[in-house]
Image (tube, rainbow, N blue to C red):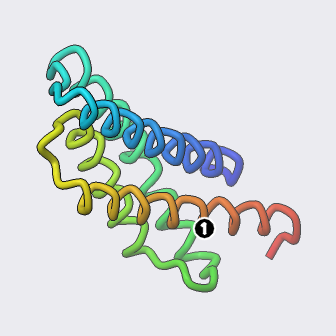
Amino acid sequence: MNIDELKLYTSELYQLNEQANEIFINSKKTGEKGDFYTQVKPFADKIKEICDVWEPAATNWIMIHKPKNLYPMQIKNTAENIQMVSIRAFFPDTSLKRFNDHIQSNQYILKRFLDILNDYLKTGD
């Protein structure tokens, strides 16, 4: 996977993480669970599909380029966390604090990785 594709996948995951947060806020507000087959599963499947491509590519890129303060384990945890929030977002009884912690952690790592990729594209190192 080239760096532009990696950047695109990372950006898409960032946006889907934001979308999961919006879904959760709405779910909490209305108190209604999402329908499993029409809402939860399609959303979770989309995120899993992207993570299955993104995680190994991002991990490989980090192992080769060794950016400062970003490690393969963070990529693995982010892929797991975003898949978890993609499901939990539809359930209003999900812990608000735990959900927000995962969302913020995902945001931080994905944004950090995007910044690193953008810097790499500018400088080439």
Residue at the spot 60% in from the left edge and 67% down from the top edge: 112
40 to 2, vertically: above or below: above
Amino acid carrying mark 1 in the image: Arg
26 to 108, vertically: above or below: above
69 to 26, vertically: above or below: below
Residue 45 lies, in percent from the top left, at 29, 31
Mark 1: give few (<14), some (14-19) or many (20+) Cα within 10 Å.
some
In the picture, residue 37 is in which quadrant? top left
Residue at the spot 23% in from the left edge and 14% down from the top edge: 38
Left or right: 60, with 117 as reference point: left
In the picture, residue 9 is in which quadrant? top right
Residue bearing mark 1: 112
Residue 70 lies, in percent from the top left, at 53, 78
Compare residues 19 and 8 and report the one nearer the observer. Answer: 19
Residue at the spot 44% in from the left edge and 45% down from the top edge: 17
Q: Secondary structure at mark 1?
A: helix
Compare residues 46 and 59 and report the one nearer the observer. Answer: 46
Residue 67 lies, in percent from the top left, at 63, 80
